[in-house]
Amino acid sequence: MNTGLLGAGIIASKFSFGATSDFPVVRVDASKRHFKSKAVDTAIKTFHSKVKNPELSWLFENCFPNTLDTTVYYSEKDNKPDTYVITGDIDAMWLRDSSAQVWPYLQFVNEDKPLKNLIKGVINHQTKCILKDPYANAFYGDETKVGEWKTDKTNMLPGVHERKWEIDSLCYPIRLAYNYYKKTNDKSPFDDNWRKSIQTILKVFREQQRKADLGPYKFQRETTQPTDTLPMAGYGFPVNPVGLICSAFRPSDDATIFPFLIPSNFFAVVSLKQAAELIKTFYNDVALEKELLSLAKEVEEAIQKHAIVNHPTYGKIYAFEIDGYGSAYLMDDANVPSLLSLPYLDAISVDDEIYQNTRKFILSKDNPYFYKGTAGEGVGGPHIGQDMIWPMSITMRALTSKDDEEIKWCIKTLSKTHGGTGFMHESFHKDDPANFTRSWFAWSNTLFGELLWRTYNEKPNLLS
């Protein structure tokens, strides 16, 4: 815990914007920050000057820059930007987390060239990771390092931290690259290696449809946690190949029950379409573009055909996981992509009737991982366990809501469940915010900062 607190910036020597004894400086001292962004610091000053709620101003200053302050390592390799991004208290780069951690800073890149180069460096580094092992979810900065999971029964390579196959690991880098280009019109990250990474992603997605065979990936770990390993000789439970893509693990890094993970398949549809657009723009590769769009269409149709379930209370809703044989798991998890997060990922309209039905189910006692207590309510998951709510789920609830009162409630709940630390966490107990996991979890911090900045720009009255 102490190491995490130090890394998050809890130990600091000075006070800053309007600090008081109630809200002492917990942001890491300027001399120890990994990266400084003028644009982000300007946003913090603006928030402080305009938002009169002192706790929200304090939380914004702590959380929004946390990725930049504590987790990024920028360099130049082969005359190109290269950025290694750790998650916080784990010295490894998840393709998912690293994309999500820098995502909220995209809006500032045209006014902050160093920040633009930093994100370009993330794209370049992710490309190398995908080409190294597209089935891995997390990597070390040292390409020769052999880590703690070296005994996992899978094809572990040096430089790979963990090799849990998750669809979203290959979607997030596309999301980041696509939106970087849309924001900057900068083509420089999209070299031949990037094109090869897209071809590799397409190949893996096709393999994991499992139409001809089980594919090359399998995984087993000697563990007491069943969510950390796969049954059936490491391939997971069987599926009927209906066009969907298998994901051995969820975004939580927990094993799937039914391998057709629906939120991640939704995300894959979006990512395949975005990749196709970029391939057309940069390479005019008609064949590859057609393949990407063809797979997107196939997965999209399979979702509509196989993933919708008639619930006795909520009507038509999307299942969380299915197996293609008719079995479905009705739940939602806190990690993104989740069913709740689909509009945030541009996978579905927030007004879609089935999504709204699904949302009502997710935020109810009928979702086995929805917890409600004296401290708050929200979605958790098996990764941490019973009664532990993830702040990320509350943030995502607000980011996908059109209801001002709901958004205001989410922000208020998050502002009173940081356990006195000034930072968001992985999870907190439904009845006790001081009982939390991961004091230094940059994604959760930055995501909350994204919510506050968006609310300030779109509905500032909700921050009073």
Image: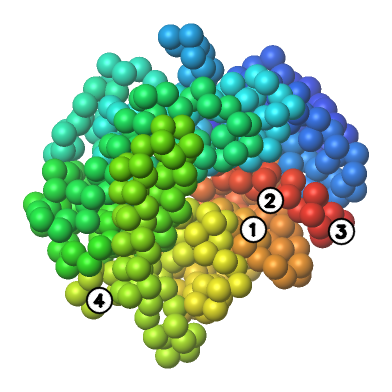
Q: Do labels 1 and 2 touch, CB within 8 Å? A: yes
**Horizontal and vertical percent for residue 129?**
35, 28
Query: Which residue does the numbered mark 4 point to in the structure image?
Result: 327
Give the Cα distance between marks 1 and 2.
6 Å
Mark found first going from the N terminus, 1 or 3: 1
Query: Which residue does the numbered mark 3 point to in the structure image?
Result: 461
Instruction: Classify residue 218 as left or right of residue 108.
Output: left
Q: Do labels 3 and 4 touch, CB within 8 Å? A: no
Q: Amino acid at mark 1?
A: Leu
Residue extending furthest toward the bottom: 312
Query: Which residue does the numbered mark 2 point to in the structure image?
Result: 451
Crowding around mark 3 (Cα neighbors within 10 Å: few <14, some 14 to 19, many 20+) is few
At 42% from the left edge and 60% from the top edge, which residue is drawn? Answer: 266
Is 332 located above or below residue 288 in the figure? below
Label 4: state its secondary structure.
Answer: loop
Is 275 located above or below residue 317 in the figure? above
Q: Amino acid at mark 3?
A: Asn
Q: Is residue 151 visible?
A: yes
Query: Which residue does the numbered mark 1 point to in the structure image?
Result: 399
Mark found first going from the N terminus, 3 or 2: 2
At 32% from the left edge and 30% from the top edge, which residue is drawn? Answer: 196
Q: Toward which corner of the image does residue 320 lie, by quadrant?
A: bottom left
Q: Quadrant of the C terminus?
A: bottom right
Label 3: state its secondary structure.
Answer: helix
Mark found first going from the N terminus, 1 or 2: 1
425 or 140: nearer the viewer: 140
286 or 219: nearer the viewer: 286
Is 42 located above or below residue 256 in the figure? above
Q: Do labels 4 and 1 touch, CB within 8 Å? A: no
Crowding around mark 4 (Cα neighbors within 10 Å: few <14, some 14 to 19, many 20+) is some
Instruction: Classify residue 371 as left or right of residue 109.
Output: left
294 or 184: nearer the viewer: 294
